[in-house]
Image (cartoon, rainbow, N blue to C red):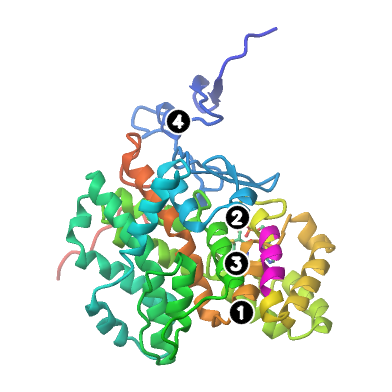
Amino acid sequence: MTERRETLTLTDNRTGTSYELPIDDGAIRATDLRQIQAADDDPGLLSYDPAFLNTASCRSAVTFIDGERGILRYRGYPIEELAERKTFLEVAYLLLYGELPDEAQLADWTFQITHHTFIHENIKQFIDGFHHDAHPMGILVGTVGALSTFYPDAKRIFDEESRRLQITRLIAKMPTLAGFAYRHAVGLFYAYPDNDLSYPGNFLNMMWKATELKYRPNPVLERALDALFILHADHEQNCSTSAMRAVGSAHADPYSALAAATAALYGPLHGGANEQVLRMLRKIGSKDSIPEYIEQVKAGKFLLMGFGHRVYKNYDPRAKLIKEVAEQVFEVTGRQPLLDIALELERIALEDEYFVSRKLYPNVDFYSGIIYLAMGFPVDMFPVLFAIGRTPGWLAQWEEGLLDPEQKITRPRQIYTGKPERHLEPAE
Ligand code: ACO
């Protein structure tokens, strides 16, 4: 029997030379490939991995996903337990500090978040400058980035106290920016934060408060929104988190990095998909039209929005939980007719060879939009709701990257495919 070694032996058939590369945690280091040279002036072998299909960009202790088995855990805790038994602020603390807060820590954390919800009055002026039909996600990208100019102390990214303060400010202010962006779109006065309310309750207050002296959120909807925020709170190295880490790796302040992450989330292949799902369901219009729509998807005319995932090749566990939340919400709001179209669409797709063979299942965005719609949110607010939930995850990943001694400025390599050296014509 040969001795088991945690190494990989590679033979370069160009030269006949063999190399033994160490394997750590199931990975080889791409930089170890650089020693593999075909000639003395060869810069060394590169690994080519467009869209990072099989490249780990970091070590992370925040979130674990097993896509084959449909498992999602934050700091080791299954998402199902957290969504059922914890609040969003407790989960945010867990993501950021690594452990759930005890009673005193939670009281202090809640106090800190509650007392940083106000935004500088000047921010209202530039929200006012946006068109009445500006997409609220565009407003959010702009205003969250602009916050960096209000907090120049945020540049002190290696000062732990400053980082803590910016993290608190960002988690506290995202719902305020989101609420103000919505109120601008509908031409309503800005509703200010109410310190008596919970995190989700206060957000509902900033969305819906009208003439009443005190807004009182419906407790079922308040809890449902909290659970939805939990389900969106982190998802390891997805597109927006990678944007957050990449911009953070250049030592930009967290407001600027979070604006970049929000911009990435805006894309319809990522967090913008929840908005597109709703538009798609409305376009389909009735259950009878589903088979024809599916045929068009299979013909490559468009994607089935809310289906498919880079890492989940089984059911997305968040989609399963969201269906449960939907039932609770519909008991208050009444059943959304679009849900029936969505359920039928899912049933037909999951029996179809095209989707089965490609392991395409509903993702988090498939059902979340229907709940948001039932709760009264306009469709273009859906990705904004996602961004509020994802903020603690972005910040936990940003801080982890910043403090990781192995990390440097993000700077991938390329394979040049352009013209070889050439020269301008001699001057006349
Ligand atoms: N509808 C139809 N076909 C699809 C879909 C879909 N939603 N998703 C993937 N496919 C097909 C692809 O065309 C491809 O087919 P092929 O092998 O014949 O070429 C195959 O399934 C594999 O898909 P990829 O695009 O290689 O998968 P990738 O991991 O790159 O993309 C993504 C994942 C972006 C999520 C993709 O599934 C998609 O565009 N889904 C729709 C948008 C969406 O719902 N995004 C939200 C994702 S969750 C989130 O970000 C929060």
Residue 33 is labelled as 4
Residue 174 location (% of width, % of height): 38, 67
Q: Amino acid at mark 1?
A: Leu
C-alpha separation, residue under disc 2 versus residue under disc 1 = 21 Å
Compare marks 2 and 1 and give the one earlier in the sequence: 2
What span is colored magenta in the figure?
A: 320-329
Left or right: 82, with 40 as reference point: right
Q: Amino acid at mark 3?
A: Ala
Residue 92 location (% of width, % of height): 45, 53
Q: Quadrant of the N terminus?
A: top right
Mark 1 falls on what kind of element? helix
Residue 270 location (% of width, % of height): 54, 64
Q: Which residue is mark 1?
A: 373
Residue 83 is labelled as 2
| Residue closest to the eye, 267 or 110 | 110
Ligand 1 found in image quarter: bottom right
Q: Is 344 within the magenta?
A: no
Question: Residue sitting at 60 percent across and 78 percent down?
Answer: 375
Q: Amino acid at mark 4?
A: Leu
> Does residue 250 appear in the picture of this structure?
no
Q: Amino acid at mark 2?
A: Ala
Question: Residue sitting at 79 percent across and 74 percent down?
Answer: 295
Left or right: 300, with 111 as reference point: right
Q: Quadrant of residue 310?
A: bottom right
Residue 224 is labelled as 3
Mark 4 falls on what kind of element? helix
Q: Residues within 10 Å of mark 2 (few under 14, many from 20)?
A: many
Q: Give yes or no for contact between labels 2 and 1 (Cβ–Cβ under 8 Å).
A: no
C-alpha separation, residue under disc 3 versus residue under disc 1 = 13 Å
